Image (cartoon, helix red, strand yellow):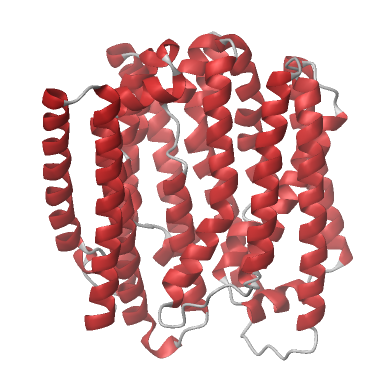
């Protein structure tokens, strides 16, 4: 059965499909974190996360922004780029990926005693899969991507569960994960080749400026690496200077809420895809309209999730991770403060206008300032202070990007964000969650209160999305 097409609102349609493609692997990873937190000793769990922490630092270097660059352009533009890449470029890139993968493999071999070839092939397969997935998203081959995503995620969960039942071994676990990662890459390659062959007969007239593309690629590659470092540098540093058990506590407390980064990425990618096929004459108006629209839709999900996690963090942590991770709750509470700013994609405008230098200035300043604040805030507040340093700099970075986006569009920063819409939602959602939290403490035990809070989150999300849909149908996008 063909996937539905939301012809009335391509932004929502593309956002939905991109989100679904990335949703299942993210949820599979969350399930594994919950299972392993409960069933593995803290030190062994810390060693398991050691692999993923280092992989998430190194694989963006291997991709170096290619997957981000691809989303920026239309199918025709991307085909023009692919047609101009020769064998020498592929060879040089292949050597780059292998060299970085060898570094990663050596780190795993020395720290976890995993056979060198397993992590080497794993990160190569993973990195190329990330790039091909972005290409297939531009080709809008959503059906194939969703099927593969579901199958891969199911196998990922099964392998981890089976590893717990049959005597836990990192060597056996990552060998099995390599198999499904390589299979996913194989399917991506076959589907990609099929899409390219079907596109050979089409005529693409998109204008092409190699120097401009190369500049944007280098900027996006640097930005992607810096952003990943920003997300993982605190975990990486703590894993080096503190014990594995303390590292495990911090890792669980500073967990990204898995759905929200996916929503932000999907919304930003959908806006870029929509603008790539739009009319150049009225691009400024289109950008403002789409950014406001995506901000309103994202806030319908981000704000209820934020208040639910903030007010019910104690019950949720005990349910998911057990009592041994109670020290992670203050870290989690501080990390949550960054969520409201996730209701907007602050780099989309800059990326669309090829202002990679501005993106990277903000990213570098963000990372440097966060690292500078880590130690003094740690001395003051302990591990929650480390998390707070990244919250503070995230808000500063968002303000920086918003200012320059507005400047490039010759408009006010307030016109780029639906601030009145956000303020009303914030007040209403906060009031309702405070009321349910207060009533729950008086009349119900912990689990019932958690269920009520979760139900309120779902109801508010669905109601807010429905109201935005009705508003869009009645009044248009703004």
Q: Position of residue 349 (x, y in %)?
A: 40, 66
The quadrant of the image that shows the C terminus is bottom left
Q: Position of residue 341 (x, y in %)?
A: 30, 48
**Which residue occupies 72% across, 23% down?**
163
**Which residue occupies 25% across, 60% down?**
464
Residue 350, quarter of picture: bottom left
Residue 353 in view, yes or no: no
The quadrant of the image that shows the N terminus is bottom right
Q: Position of residue 360 (x, y in %)?
A: 47, 51
Determine whether 341 is above or below 171 in the image. below
Residue nearest the viewer, comparing 454 with 122: 454
Q: Is residue 289 rendered to the left or right of residue 208?
A: left
Q: How many marks?
A: 0
Residue 362 in view, yes or no: yes
Q: Is residue 443 rendered to the left or right of residue 357?
A: left
Residue 147, quarter of picture: bottom right
Residue nearest the viewer, comparing 340 with 161: 161
**Which residue occupies 13% across, 56% down?**
424
Residue nearest the viewer, comparing 86 with 235: 235
Q: Is residue 455 rendered to the left or right of residue 46?
A: left
Determine whether 289 is above or below 451 in the image. below
Q: Position of residue 294 (x, y in %)?
A: 35, 65
Determine whether 411 is above or below 259 in the image. below
Residue nearest the viewer, comparing 330 with 87: 330
Residue 425, quarter of picture: bottom left
**Which residue occupies 45% across, 46% down?**
259
């Amino acid at each position: 059965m063909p996937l539905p097409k939301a012809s009335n609102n391509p932004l929502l349609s593309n956002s939905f499909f991109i989100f679904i493609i990335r949703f299942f692997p993210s949820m599979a990873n969350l399930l594994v974190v919950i299972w392993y937190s409960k069933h593995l000793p803290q030190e062994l769990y810390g060693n398991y996360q050691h692999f993923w922490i280092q992989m998430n630092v190194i694989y963006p270097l291997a991709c170096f922004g290619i997957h981000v660059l691809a989303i920026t352009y239309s199918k025709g533009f991307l085909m023009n780029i692919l047609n101009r890449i020769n064998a020498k470029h592929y060879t040089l890139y292949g050597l780059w990926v292998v060299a970085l993968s060898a570094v990663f493999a050596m780190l795993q071999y020395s720290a976890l005693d995993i056979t060198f070839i397993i992590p080497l092939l794993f990160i190569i397969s993973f990195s190329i899969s990330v790039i091909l997935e972005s290409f297939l998203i531009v080709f809008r081959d959503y059906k194939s991507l969703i099927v593969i995503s579901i199958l891969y995620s199911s196998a990922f969960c099964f392998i981890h569960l089976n590893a717990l039942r049959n005597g836990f071994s990192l060597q056996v676990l990552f060998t099995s994960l390599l198999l499904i990662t390589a299979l996913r890459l194989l399917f991506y390659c076959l589907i990609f080749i099929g899409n390219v062959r079907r596109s050979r007969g089409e005529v693409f007239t998109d204008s092409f400026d190699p120097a401009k593309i190369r500049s944007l690629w280098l900027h996006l590659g640097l930005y992607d690496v810096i952003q990943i470092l920003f997300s993982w540098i605190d975990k990486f540093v703590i894993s080096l200077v503190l014990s594995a058990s303390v590292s495990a506590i911090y890792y669980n407390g500073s967990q990204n809420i898995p759905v929200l980064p996916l929503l932000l990425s999907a919304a930003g990618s959908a806006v870029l895809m929509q603008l790539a096929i739009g009319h150049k004459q009225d691009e400024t108006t289109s950008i403002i309209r789409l950014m406001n629209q995506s901000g309103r839709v994202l806030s319908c999900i981000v704000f209820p999730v934020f208040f639910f996690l903030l007010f019910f963090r104690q019950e949720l942590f005990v349910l998911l991770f057990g009592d041994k991770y109670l020290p992670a709750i203050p870290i989690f509470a501080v990390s949550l403060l960054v969520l409201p700013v996730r209701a907007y994609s602050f780099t989309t405008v800059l990326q669309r206008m090829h202002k990679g230098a501005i993106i990277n200035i903000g990213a570098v300043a963000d990372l440097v300032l966060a690292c500078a604040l880590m130690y003094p805030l740690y001395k003051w507040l302990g591990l929650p202070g480390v998390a707070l340093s990244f919250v503070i700099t995230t808000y500063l970075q968002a303000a920086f990007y918003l200012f320059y986006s507005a400047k490039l569009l010759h408009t006010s920063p307030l016109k780029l964000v639906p601030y009145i819409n956000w303020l009303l939602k914030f007040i209403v959602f906060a009031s309702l969650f405070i009321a349910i939290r207060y009533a729950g403490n008086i009349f119900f035990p912990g689990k019932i209160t958690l269920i009520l809070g979760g139900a309120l989150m779902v109801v508010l999300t669905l109601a807010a999305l429905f109201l935005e849909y009705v508003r869009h149908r009645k009044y248009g996008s703004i």
